[in-house]
Image (cartoon, grey):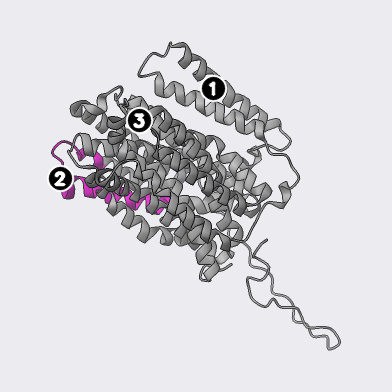
Amino acid sequence: MRLASAQGRLTLGAAALGTGMAFLDGTVVNVALPAIGEDLDAGLAGLQWTVNAYALTLAGLLLIGGSLGDHIGRRRVFAWGVAWFALASLLCTVAPTIETLIAARAIQGVGAAMLTPGSLALLEATFHPDDRGAAIGAWSGLAGVSTAIGPFLGGWLVEAVSWRLIFLINLPLAAAVLWASRAIPESSDASVRGQRLDVAGAALAALGLAGVTYALTEGPGGSWTDPAVLVLGVGGVLAMAAFLAQQARGAHPLVPLDIFSSRLFSAANAMTFVVYAALAGALFLLPIQLQQVTGYTPLEAGASLIPMTIVMLLLSSWAGRLAQRIGPRLPMGVGPIVAAAGLALLVRVGPDAGYVADVLPAVVVFGLGLAITVAPLSVAVLGAAGEARAGIASAINNAVSRVAGLLAVAVIPVAAGISGDDYLVPAAFDEGFETGVLISAALCASGGVLSLALVRNPEPAAEPEPAPAHCAISGPPPEIPAHPGAGIVGR
């Protein structure tokens, strides 16, 4: 389909809003963390788990979600995920304790694991090749705006009513996505039909991530020699090793390891890991810093990130077209380095920080770097894998970004010296925040260096030879398609 058609606009809208809903929930919670901690009497570990329970099930099940879409239909699995996500959001809204909120967030992540990989795979499978770069760029921009607007929306809802409304807003959004998704043509991967889903692989990946994350989150606040920390941490590492071994020898693996034989695909995912770790670490710490140290209200803390939203909205589609024209290497190299500069500027955000002098420059530069990076990265990942593997390629890349964020939220506060109830002590948190954003900046810059060193632009496709003119009077004229996109839809 073409992007300018009514069906194309509805498809793009459904995919972007569905993904945006999941991305929104990944960031809207951050600005509400102090309010959640106060209302439900939670320490730093409880707040980390409020973020990581969602990220854990999302990261652990993304691969099975992408594979399920390739098997039985991407539109169908996408719609299932949206409905599941809405139900889980309702559970989060009524959670009476931090433990029940964490459990509801884990359930919510399952729905996100079904809808997130499907949304990007739908664009790759249904749009005309000439429009894919623009469609992915627009998807990146709109979904990225959801990520960026989350803190503002969360801050307004927390201040105006309650933190519980940050979950309730997902219900009307989900209804809109389900309505628009009726326009999406169904697609799947014909090469995997009849194959069994790799449920064992999905279970090993989820268990491995859960064990490692538990150890990294609970170990610093208690004791690394605690039996639960030791058993689950070591068990998680063993489960991850078993997952890799099982994928290497399985007949129908969840992650076909040969997909990493593409240098571009491997490099893009390595860059994804470090950049999204930086992003998650910074966006976990910044809303707490603005509220607990600088003295912003939740609304002011969220509103301070609006310029990042505007920059991403204006530039992401352009960045997608640019990557399609000149190749992804340069944008993927320059973008993270620009974003790292923005993160480094956040060290100026302290007790006496002014918005225009200290917060705004960092936010604008950071948003510029993300806008340059995200769409070219998506174009590179899907282009390297090809249309037939769009679902699993999207799932792998999303899983890499989520695992990166999961580990960053567990590790970066600890590496910065923040633990226990430090978020309630402004001086202690301020000191750790400065270290934390510098760690995030270094990670982000390393992603740019990785891209410049490892990414190579794909070779341009060879122009087809012109068909010879048909001159035989007795023969039929050559058959010409009615329009250039004939046969693309539903392929």
The image shows residue 190 at horizontal and vertical percentages of: 72, 52
The image shows residue 114 at horizontal and vertical percentages of: 56, 44
Q: Residues within 10 Å of mark 3 (few under 14, many from 20)?
A: many
The image shows residue 19 at horizontal and vertical percentages of: 48, 50
Amino acid carrying mark 1 in the image: Val
Amino acid carrying mark 2 in the image: Gly
Amino acid carrying mark 3 in the image: Leu
**Residue located beneath label 2 in the image:** 354
Which segment did they paint magenta? 345-374
Q: Is residue 246 shown in magenta?
A: no
**Residue located beneath label 3 in the image:** 47
Residue positioned most to the left: 352
**Direction from residue 316 to residue 153 in the image, left or right:** left
Q: Residues within 10 Å of mark 1 (few under 14, many from 20)?
A: some
**Residue located beneath label 1 in the image:** 237
Residue at point 40% right, 20% down?
A: 218
